[in-house]
Amino acid sequence: MRIRRLLTLAVVMLTLGLAWVLGGCTAFGPDPGEQPSGGPTVNGDVGAPETTLSIVAGSEQQSVLTEIVLPWCRAQGYSCNWRLLGSVDQARLLQSGGYDNDAFWFASSVFSQMGNTSGALRDSEPMFLTPIVFAARPAVLTRLGLGDQSTAEQVMAATESGKARVWATNPTQSNSGATVLFSFLNIVAGNPPGQALTHDQLNSTEVVDGMRRFFAAIDRTPPSTGTMTSMCVAAPDECEAMFTYEDLVIEKNAELAAAGQEPLHVVYPRGALGISDAPLGFVDHGQEGADAKYRIFTELKSYLTTDPAALTQLLAMGRRPAAGVGLAVADPDPAVFNPDWGIQADIAEQGVTFPAADVITEALDHYHTAFRRPADIYYCLDGSGSMGGNGGWSGVQSAATALFDPEEAARNLLQTAPDDRTTVAVFNDRVSGGPWRVDGNADADLSDLEGRIRAHSPDGGTDMYVCLDQALDSFAGTDRKRLIVVMSDGQSSPSGSSAMLAALRQAQVPVIAIAFGDVDPTQLRDLADASGGAYVENSNLVAALREAAGYK
């Protein structure tokens, strides 16, 4: 629900319920232009080629597409449609050349630079600006010693102090996380905002050690900014502060205020402020009506950046004008850019300069291989008989390649780190395969793990609690970041449910629970809720397991 609607309803009805906001390289993975079952849905209108503009966009642009772009297109007699992809999938689709759309709308130049290695994307320009902020409730900011004028160095020190549980998204899967990564890389390297990180700086001992300290202090790294923001607001004891988009804080605060709850307060990390610039670019790949499509594209860009009505709508959503002076907003609506929330409409900060594409790619690789905290991930995969009949096991086998084949994992930006521990167990009414464990990231060991999963044949009943018991036991004595990924298409015997939920609450190990097929989601939702994890429902198991792996 958007800000404009929230504020109107608040005046008329005086109360609102909380709403969820769901968000989420060099050679990328399998061509995402070939979407499997459960792939992105095309939204909007389709007409004659010369009057149709097709866009691949990040989930961050969904509200703008629905509320601003689509009505404009219809008013002009055009047919505009879009499908939503994550930042990594957008970038690898652009790089693959296997697309049939006319334009790409990224959340940030970080991933557009990575994908545009062939130069196919042209006339790409920012449509609006959204800074990345550090958000927490006022008491937490006081505990951390942070205020409205805090510098990026102070925000970094406060994060590393251990005085609060801080979340940020996985920089290899989410634009906001990538922006945070490059902002603080610049700080550790000693660069001012206008100086881009270099290859030599990235690989210096000082930078590697500094980023290890920073990411060791990040408690959770979900792969989607919208999902993370909603999870954080809903669980203030588990997430006391986060790095997120300013416009999402504005939206969440409107909901919190309407519900009579304390809103979040934001801090802008001065000296290394990351800004998402929402670049929209055109691709001419010989499609029918390309010249006419390009005219629609240029008209749309002009509308979004210069038309007073469009700019008013964007400002109501918390998006700052791209054509303004820096981040300044003229005559801001205090109900949106609310100073009581720490929102500074007149902030005069230069955004951090992103490095060259090859440095971006190397830095994202370093996140897994050098920066992040080592992870101990235990996969509990449903290998019951029903998985053999509904296509589920073939999806698991394909996901095993995406996650554990070293080359494919690198293309998906989901590499296993040198000090990671990865365990896979397959269950039916018992643990029927494994557990197979890999310590480290040796190519041969990970390939062997993939082979064992592919060789397994599903049969039998369903009892995921047997596998979860073994998963919890396996974490004894580990100092790695712990995570359980469980996937099921069936109903387990309820006899083990209560004890497992209690054990998860005590262990505080997050569970990413994936529902496949016609499963009753209750048991899986309970696991996610009890553990502070997440529930994922996706008929595309490759995408679902990739999303789950993105939490490391």
Image (tube, rainbow, N blue to C red):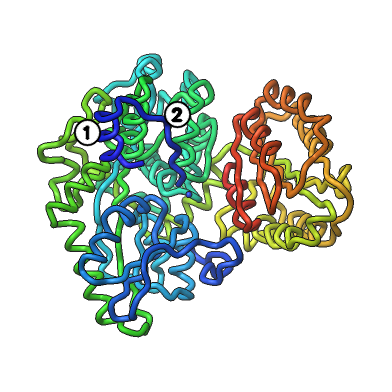
Which residue is under mark 1? 337
Front residue of 197 and 385? 385
Left or right of 294: which side holds 15? Answer: right
Which secondary structure, mark 1? loop
Quarter of the image with the C terminus is top right
Q: Amino acid at mark 2?
A: Val
User: Please, is residue 369 above or below residue 147 in the view?
Assistant: below
Residue 534 in the image, given as x and y percentages of width and height: 59, 38
Q: In whole angstroms, how far apart are the C-alphas of marks 1 and 2?
A: 19 Å
Is there any visible trace of residue 211 in the rendered image?
Answer: yes
Residue most toward the front? 13
Q: Work out which residue is located at the far left of the displayed protein and give it.
A: 331
Quarter of the image that includes the N terminus: top left
Residue 82 in picture, x, y percent from top left: 39, 64
Of the numbered discs in the image, which one, if any, rests on residue 233? Answer: 2
| CB-based contact (under 8 Å), mark 1 and mark 2 | no
The number of callouts visible is 2
Side (left or right) of 62 relative to 433: left
* Residue lying at 41% horizontally and 25% vertically, measured from the top left: 157
Q: Secondary structure at mark 2?
A: helix
Q: Is residue 264 visible?
A: no
Q: Is residue 62 left or right of residue 504?
A: left
Tell which of 125 and 290 is nearer to you. 290
- Provide residue 80's location: percent of width, then percent of height: 32, 68
Label 1 environment density (alpha carbons within 10 Å; few <14, some 14–19, many ≥20): many
Above or below for 201 versus 240: below
Q: Residue 159, position in %: x, y?
A: 44, 26
Residue at 60% across, 30% down? 532
- Tell me which numbered mark, 1 or 2, is placed earlier along the sequence: 2
Q: Quadrant of residue 109?
A: bottom left
| Amino acid beneath label 1 | Phe
Q: Residues within 10 Å of mark 2 (few under 14, many from 20)?
A: many
